[in-house]
Image (tube, grey):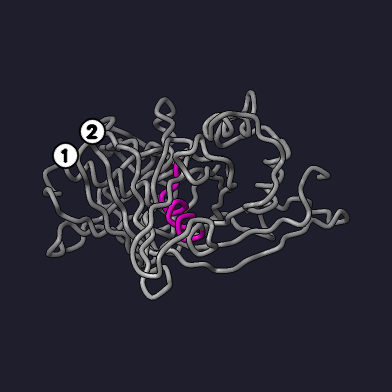
Amino acid sequence: MSTTPRPVRTTDYHAAGEPFRIVDQDLPPIPGDTVAERRATVIGAGGTATDPRRGPLDDLRRLLVREPRGHAGMYGGFVVPADDDGAHFGVLFWHKDGYSTACGHGTMALGAWAVDTGRVPAPDDGDVAVRIDVPSGRVTATVHRRGGRTTGVTFRNIPTVVIARKVPVTASFGAVEVDLAHSGACYASVPARALGLDTTRHSLPALVRAGREIRAAFPEHEVYGVILHEDLPDTPDGPHQRNVTVFADGQIDRSPCGSGTSARLVLLAEDGRLAPGATLTHESVAGTVFTGRLLPGGVTEVTGSAHRTGTHTFVLDPHDDLGTGFAL
């Protein structure tokens, strides 16, 4: 573990309840001219997004995401250079199992962090766009300000496309039809009621089991997240749904899932349930809310809140037998 920087400084945020741990300090060299190339470098030759080869940066990820410093639901990002002068910075997203190509809630958190720390100048009242290069492309976090504080963030994603509709999947819970959409990462959507479930907390163990089985049914599409959704009464502005997004290896998104909301928007529009100019009210299992709207060309905007939860200095005691920690 001599390659892991000590101490490691982080700033933590949450976006609608989902954590995001930001590392903005000197990192081990990461070869690559773009964020996507740097992600490939970090995963390593022969590694995969959810089973990266060990290296200096992955040791750091494990240190910050695993217990006792993190937990199975922890999420974060390494701040890296942008692809070019068109963006303010880049980010490598990580979680318990590896590195993702997209993260909507993390983009919101990074936008708030960039403004709150003065990295991107912003007015006391008004909006400022923070442009961020992520592995799937260039995204924007528009930070809303009032009275000298950040009041919300709108995440504009890369264009979202529908991949497939009503794909039959049979697993231990029976047969269901699955919709696939790519919104920076590939998401599978399934009505929770088709599994005989709802999207409340008591159903979480069964939803996680179903999410894992559905994800495993699509190895060729490299499905990142499974969105198990439920209709709630519409609002005057449009449809209202609650979802549990199970991503990576059985992790539960505490937020309504930013990139997942993009996927839901294009599917609802294709079904004729999201009229032009309408807004999706998207609720999480924790009761937090994102609102989303669909723009021309499959571009989506998702709005929510992001708040700082702390600043931390983590250390690795060379005599600690647990090393970079453990995952339960």
* Snapshot quadrant of residue 224: top left
Label placed on residue 270: 1
Report the residue at 31% width, 61% height from top. 283
Q: Which residues lie in the magenta part?
A: 102-113
**Mark closer to the chain start, 2 or 1:** 2
Say if residue 205 shows up in the picture.
no
Q: Hey, which residue is sitting farthest bottom in the picture?
A: 147
The kind of residue on which mark 1 rests is Glu
Left or right of 229: which side holds 184?
A: right
Horizontal side of 25 relative to 240 (left or right) equals right
Magenta residue check for 111? yes
Disc number for residue 115: none
* Secondary structure of the residue carrying numbered label 1: helix
Q: Is residue 164 above or below residue 253?
A: above
**Depth order, front residue of 94/8:** 8
Determine the image quadrant of residue 49: top right
- The residue closer to the viewer here, 234 or 114, is 114
Quarter of the rendering containing residue 111: bottom left
Check residue 162 for magenta coloring: no
Q: Around disc 2, counting alpha carbons within 10 Å, would you say few (fewer than 14), some (14 to 19), or many (20 or more)? A: some
Closest to the observer, 53 or 167: 53
Q: How far across and how far down the image is residue 32, in percent?
A: 60, 29
Give the x, y percent position of residue 262: 30, 46
Q: Quadrant of the C terminus?
A: bottom right
What secondary structure is the magenta-colored segment mainly?
helix
Contact (CB < 8 A) between labels 2 and 1? Answer: yes
Q: Quadrant of the N terminus?
A: top right
Residue 287, how many percent across, how many down? 35, 67
Q: Residues within 10 Å of mark 1 (few under 14, many from 20)?
A: few
What is the secondary structure assignment of the residue under circle 2? strand
Type of amino acid under label 2 = Arg
- The residue carrying mark 2 is 165
